[in-house]
Amino acid sequence: MKFMPLLLLAVLWQTASMTGLLPATVLPPFSSVVAALVSLVTSGEIFPHTAASFLRAGAGLLLAVIFGTALGLAMARVRAIQRSIEPILLSIYPVPKPALIPLFMVWLGIGDVSKIAVIALSCLVPVVISTFNGARAVDDILLWSARARGTAEHRLLWRVVLPAALPQIATGVRTAIAIALIVMVSSEFISAEHGLGYLIFSYGGVGADDAMLAVVLYLTAIGFLIDRAYVAGLRRLLAWHAFAH
Amino acid sequence: MLPACAGCWLGMPSRTETNRNILQQVLPLGTLLLVWELVARAGVVNPYVFPPVSAIVMQWASLFGNGSIFAPLGATVWRALAGLGAAVIIGAPLGMLMGRARWAQWFFEPLFSFFFPLPKIALIPLYVHLFGLFSFSKVMLIFTDCIFPIVIFTYHGARGVSPIYPWSAQARGTSHLRMFWRVVFPLSLDSLYDGIQVAVVVAVLVAVVSEMIAGGGGLGYAMMLAFRYGDVRSAFAFLVTISLVGFFLYKVVQLLRERLLFWHVTET
């Protein structure tokens, strides 16, 4: 019900095409975009590309979450690490990450490794920053009471700091997911033989606008579903958390 | 439904310690650059692929010296600011309208929340087809990307306006239209500014990426060209310039905030 306006927009698009207000040379009618999407899905053509894209994005994101959380926690707990990493992080921050794609291709080749590396580096920054902020904001009372009940120092991190910082980390990861998709598509535009970005670019290049728009629509829907699933999953996972609303 | 937090958008870092001396700030970066220089000079890596820092700095200086960097620099900045400006002009009133009028919220909120996770860069081929190969398609893409933070921030800002202000304005006989201009607009300027601060970073990013992919001059194109010729030093110099442009524009916007919004009661 909430997404009625989307339907309305599609109907408007279709009528504009049918009445000739919107020539097919400018924008193909919505119905032929849908038809192209259906044939991409029924022929199975789109699935290997989807898999290639999301393996890259997923691998990069996973690396960023693992290393980013570890680094963020280390920065929050150890002063020397914070002092040495923070200036470097602040200087990486303004670099538009997709601009690193050609550099990583020169270093690591044009295959998947360079793409995954750029995605990981791009996603690392928000994960580190949110973990760091979350871990620093942990209530001292939690630490004190854990210590009073005999929790060993080395277990505090795992048992208290990480769980308490989870909501903040989760917000950083949500940002990282969006960044992963951006870098994934850009890297596939620049050089790839598989992937959704490659598919959009090659259909656009041969003037098959309906198929190109079908892939864009498909990508939008997947991005939307991933974001929704993430937020919904998080709400269940963090239901125990005092800060979860 | 839409992300509401100002700082979490692009994982914006916040300086944690302000009273830190310069040496502690510079030391880690200096060490990193020194190690880079030594590794590159030691001959363990191919200096064409991994040039020493000093060579990059020299190349950077010579790009400024012979003036060849100014045309691409100007093109990128111009496109980024034009797209951002258009996004503010269209997006700010739209966001405020969405925040105050039911029907506008009903229609636009689902559109923005559905297309929000789409990497707008995927629209490059479509925009090249619709708006041509040159600056116009790039400005339109920057506009499309920047309007999201602008609309979302002003929308939340206009929604969050304390009802006391409209009430007292209404009590004093302010009409609907004037209310928008005299009460809602000034009170949501603060969130609009948050949106602009996010959008300026996005604008530079999209400008550079669209130049890298679709060509047509600018720093992104110049960097790609340098890579194609195997001129990694120049490519690095362009990369540094790109990063500085983003950083500089972000800082300018941040510094202007106190000047422009000096009268605004910002809750901290």
Image (cartoon, coloured by chain):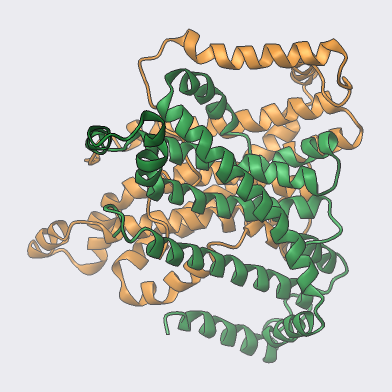
Chain colours: A green, B orange
Foreground of the two, B237 or B50: B50
| Residue in view at x 66 percent, y 48 percent | A60
Q: Position of residue B14 (x, y in %)?
A: 42, 32
| Residue in view at x 43 percent, y 60 percent | A234
Q: Position of residue A201 (x, y in %)?
A: 80, 62
Quarter in which the C terminus of chain B is drawn: top left
Q: Is residue B241 visible?
A: yes
Compared to A142, does B50 lie above or below?
above
Q: Is residue B125 visible?
A: no
Foreground of the two, B71 or A187: A187
Residue A25: which quarter of the image? bottom right
Compared to B71, does B140 lie above or below?
below
Compared to A6, does B123 lie above or below?
above
Q: Position of residue B257 (x, y in %)?
A: 37, 35
Side (left or right) of B66 relative to A4? right
| Residue in view at x 82 percent, y 20 percent | B51
